[in-house]
Amino acid sequence: MCTLTYIPTETGFVFTSNRDEQSIRAQAAPPEAYDIGGQAVWYPKDGLAGGTWIASSVKRQLCLLNGAFDRHERHPPYRKSRGLVLLDSFRYKNLYDFFHHYLLGEIEPFTLVEVSDEETPCLAELRWDGANKSYREFDSSKGYIWSSATLYTKEQREKREAWFLAFHKNNPHPTQNEILDFHRFSGEGNKRYDLVMEVGNSLQTLSITSIERSEKERSMRYLDLLNDSEYVLREEK
């Protein structure tokens, strides 16, 4: 929900998210397959609102981060949880179609990133700041990192990007395990903005979810950091 990386591999890509959330929030359920509009979608389910922050179907992967470009003032109540908005997006052909047709009024600001599993993956981003939405596509042959604008300052996001670029330069074709290590251990010893973060006694990184797509299979690995457990979904193409 709050840190996301996309890294192309020799046979596909890896899409990995750290969820930073209140530890007192109702515990999320490990990923399962759910039916959305006749398609099987894998995702861990939020224990409070029933939505999710990351999900995968046969052709699409989506991850939502809180906030758009900068920190915003909250003005609840909101019409719908952002995690449910992510699931709604699977009822559209792609993120571009969702961008043009979905009504976002009274939804809290967010960033939604999609990578589609085409012959050449399409990597795109939708940002909603509470009043305006913007759409952007990226070069899917390169790696990227996103950090939540609500939790991290511009300077902290830039530091995280520097860590990511250094990692990717030293590991141009990393394995999923190497990427998970980056998500678990990167930083400089400051829990406020290391990739596995903790602020006070409540806000912290609760889990890491990593989706790997290759020519032969799709998999989702879910690391529950609070309970020190791992769950895996896998299917062959």
Image: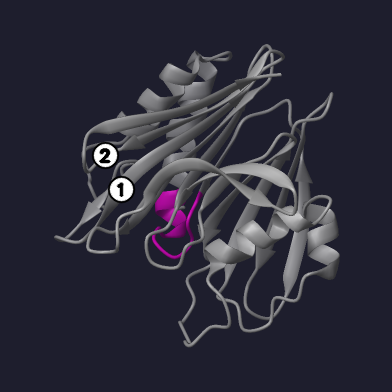
Could you tell me residue 156's position as x and y percent?
40, 51
For the residues labelled 2 and 1, say whether their Cβ atoms are less than 8 Å apart.
yes
Q: Residue at x 54, y 23 (%)?
A: 234
Mark 2–mark 1 distance (CA, rounded to whole Å): 8 Å
| Residue 15 screen position, x and y as percent | 57, 33
Q: Is residue 226 above or below residue 167?
A: below
- Which quadrant, please, contains the C terminus? top right
Magenta highlight on residue 155: yes
Residue at (75, 49) in percent of width and height: 38
Asked if 229 appears above or below 104 in the picture, the reply is: above
Quickly name the residue at label 2. 225
At horizontal 37% and vertical 60% (from top left) the residue drawn is 47
Residue 63, position in %: x, y? 58, 48
Mark 1 — residue?
A: 205
The magenta region covers 147-157
Dot 2 crowding, Cα within 10 Å, few <14, some 14–19, many 20+: some
Q: Is residue 97 magenta?
A: no
Q: Secondary structure at mark 1?
A: strand
Q: Report the amino acid beneath label 1.
A: Thr
